[in-house]
Amino acid sequence: MVVEVLNGTTVVGLARVMTTELRRAGIDVVYFGNWRESALDSTLILIRRGDSSFAGVIRDAIGAGRVVLDPDPRLLLDASVVLGRDVAAGGDLDP
C-alpha cells in the first residue's frame, strides 16, 4: 500500500515520527507534510483508491484512526493518513 502522512495538529514533527512508525510496519510512505488545517481532534485514514481492507494495518501501526472512504484517483495513493490530537497526545515524539 502507498500512503501519505499529513500532520493535522500543531505538534511539530508529528508526521515525520509517524512516517517512521508506518515504514517499520511495512507501509510505503511516499510523502509526509502538513494538512490544510491544524486542529483535528481525531486521526483520519482517508481511503483514496481500492478497498479499505488495509486500513487496520495503518491503525495498528499508529494506534488510532477513523476510516473514511474519500476516493481521489488524482493522488495515486491508497490512503492519506491525517494525524489528529489523539495520536499526538498518546506517544513519545522522539524520532
Image (cartoon, helix red, strand yellow):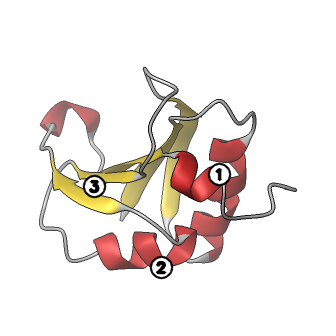
Q: Is residue 89 above or below residue 84?
A: below
Label for residue 88? 1
What is the distance, in whole Å, between disc 1 and disc 2 at their CAs? 15 Å
Label for residue 60? 2
Residue that mark 3 sits on: 78
What is the distance, in whole Å, between disc 3 and disc 1 at their CAs? 23 Å
In what element is the residue under mark 3? loop
Residue 27 is situated, as x and y percent measured from the top left of the image, at 49, 68
Q: Residue at x 73, y 64 (%)?
A: 91
Q: Residues within 10 Å of mark 3 (few under 14, many from 20)?
A: many
Query: In the image as oriented, which residue stretches furthest toward the right?
Result: 94
Question: Which of these two is toward me, 9 or 36?
Answer: 9
Left or right of 43? Residue 86 is right
Q: Earlier in the sequence, mark 3 or mark 1?
A: 3
Q: Is residue 37 visible?
A: yes
In what element is the residue under mark 2? helix
Residue 85 is situated, as x and y percent measured from the top left of the image, at 55, 47
Q: Residues within 10 Å of mark 2 (few under 14, many from 20)?
A: few
What is the distance, in whole Å, between disc 3 and disc 2 at their CAs? 17 Å
Amino acid type of the residue tagged 2 in the rendering: Asp
Amino acid type of the residue tagged 3 in the rendering: Asp
- Quarter of the picture containing the C terminus is bottom right
Q: Residue at x 58, y 57 (%)?
A: 87
Discs 3/1, front = 1
Q: Earlier in the sequence, mark 3 or mark 2?
A: 2
